[in-house]
Amino acid sequence: MLTCHVLLIHAAGAQGAVDTSTLHRGNGGEPDSLHIHQAQGLNSQNILRDICEGLMTMDANGRPAAGVAESWHVSDDGLHWTFQLRKNARWHDGSPVLAEDFVRAWRMAVTPQSQAHQAQLFDVLKNAHAIRTGTAPAEKLGVKALSGHQLLIQLTHAEPMLPEYLSLPVFCPLPARPVATDGSYPASNGAYFVQQWVPQEKVVLQKNPHFHAARQVFFEHVVYHITEEPASELKRFRAGELDLTETIPDNQIDWIRQHMPQRLHIYPYLGTFFLGLNIRHPPLDRPALREALFWAIDRDILTQKVLKSGQQPAYRIIPPAMMDENATNTLPPFVSRNAQLAYARKKLAESGVRPHTAAPVEILYNTSANQRKVALAVAAMWRQNLGIRARLRNVEWKVFVNERKKPHRQVFRSGWIADINDPLDFLRLFSHDSPNNFYHYHNPDYDELLQRIEKSPQSQRQHQIRQAEEILLRDIPVIPLYFYVSRHLLSARIGGYRDNVADRHLSRYLYDKHTSQPPL
C-alpha cells in the first residue's frame, strides 16, 4: 500500500481540495440490505462485492479469479471440487476465515426459513433443491469442511461455470460469531468493511487491514453516495463530488457526449429490461391482453428517441450475446409496424377488454427520472395504439422491492442482470419455486424442460434453451423492452477501471492516477 497521499483539486467546479485516499462512488438508491442472503438490488450487490469475498472473486476485467481459495482440484467426473483456503484469509477483526464458515453460510442460505433471494443458485450443489423445498435437512447439503482450510463441494451435475457461481456475494462465508464490535454492520472478509451507514445519504467503507491482498488496495475509504435520481448524480459528478456514477440521466446523453465524451463509458451488458406482469391478477390473467400489450410497444422509438444510450430493442428475454450466432433477437411474423399494430388490436378484441376504459392496469416503478420516462412512453403507446389508459405509481427503491411481490400489483418495472454468463440464469427466474418469480408464473411443461436442460451436456443446451424461451414468449409473464448497456461517468483521476460485460468494478482495483505509481 502506498503511503504517499497528495491533496489535489478535483474535477472542475469542485470547491477546495479532495483527500485522494477516498473513492467516491454513486450508488443509485438506498441498499435494500447488506446481508449476503437478503440483498437484492445492484445497489446492495456492488457494496457487498467490496466487503465480502467468496472462494472466488472477480478480477478487474469482470472474470472469475481466486478469492479466499488459493487453489482447487476438480475430479474427473466434474462432481467433486476440493478447495484449499488461504491461510492468511481474515475477517476484519483479524480472526481467520475457515472452511466451516462457508459450510455455515451455505446451509443457512438454502434453508426455507432464510428466504435467501438467490437460494436457487445453490441447486447446483448436491441436495440443495431438496433442502430448499423442505424435504431434506440442511446437513445434507453437498459441502463439507475437510479441515480448517480445506473445503469439499459435491455437485448434482458437472458445472464448468462453478467458479462464476462462487464469486457471487450469496456464496460468501459467515463467521461463527458477530465480528463487528457493535453488531450493527455485517462481518467483512473483503477488501473493506462498513464503517458507517447513514440512511438515504451514504455508506462509508474502510479498508480492511487484515485483507489478504491489502497491499494492493489503494483507497483507505470508499463512500457510496445514495442518489435516487441520475440527474443528481450528474450534478455531483460535475461538482467533483463523485469519481464514478452508477448511471447517467437519459435526457442528458447528448450533452454528455458533446461536453464530457472522455468521461463517458457505455458498454454492452448482460442484462434485459422488461415489464413484469402479475398474470394471476385481472385483467392480466387474459393471455390475449398480455399479447396485445406486448406488440403495442414500439421498441425502436423507446431505444432511439427516449433512451438514446445504445440500448437495443428486445423481443426476447435472453441477451443475444449469451446465445450462438444462429439465435435471433427479433420475432419475424410481422412485415411492418402497421401489421404489428393490427395484430395487437386483434388480440385486444379477443381479450374482451374494451378500449378507453378507465385505468385497467397500473404500472409500478421505482423513483427515478429514467424509469419514469420508460413508464410514460409505454403508457402513451398503450393509450395511442390500444386505447388503454394505464395509471403510473412510483415508490422509492426499498419500498419497490417489497411492493413488486405483493398480490395486488399488476405491471411493474423489472429486468434481470446476469449473475453468471449463462442463459439458464435468466430462465431460472420463471421456475415456479424461484424466489425471484414475482410474476406468479407456473407452467409444469416449462419446469420439466428446465430440469432437463440442467442435466444436459453443454453441446445440447442451446436448442433446449431456445425452446424454453419460446414457452415464455407464448405465455408472456414479462414483456421484454430492451437489452441493457452499462453507463457510467468516470473521473479523470481514477485508474484501474476496465469496461466489462458483467459491469463489475470492485473498488480494490481502482486507484488515483495522480499519485507516483499505481498500487503494487
Image: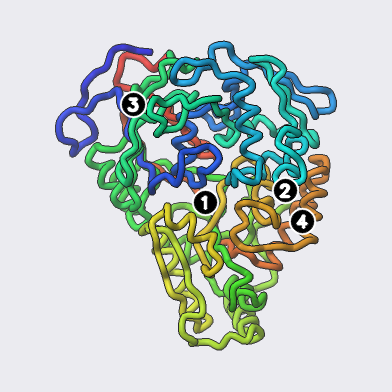
Identified by mark 1, the residue type is Tyr
Mark 4 or 2: in front is: 2
Lower sequence index among marks 4 and 2: 2
Above or below for 46 versus 383? above
Pointer 2 with pointer 1, Cβ within 8 A: no
Please give the name of the residue rendered at 46% of the width and 24% of the height, measured from the top-left corner. 179
Mark pair 2, 1: CA separation: 33 Å
Mark 1 or 3: in front is: 3
Q: Is residue 295 visible?
A: no
Residue situated in front as seen by the camera: 249 or 337:
249
Identified by mark 2, the residue type is Thr
The answer to whether 407 appears left or right of 446 in the picture is: left
Mark pair 1, 4: CA separation: 27 Å
Mark pair 1, 3: CA separation: 30 Å
The answer to whether 107 appears left or right of 337 in the picture is: right
Please give the name of the residue rendered at 53% of the width and 58% of the height, measured from the top-left corner. 414
For the C terminus, the image quarter is top left
Q: Residues within 10 Å of mark 3 (few under 14, many from 20)?
A: many
Give x and y (percent) for residue 345: 60, 83
Mark pair 4, 2: CA separation: 15 Å
Lower sequence index among marks 2 and 3: 2
**What residue sits right under mark 3 in the picture?**
221
Mark 1 or 4: in front is: 4
Identified by mark 4, the residue type is Asp
**What residue sits right under mark 2 in the picture?**
133
Label 3 SS: strand
Label 4 SS: helix
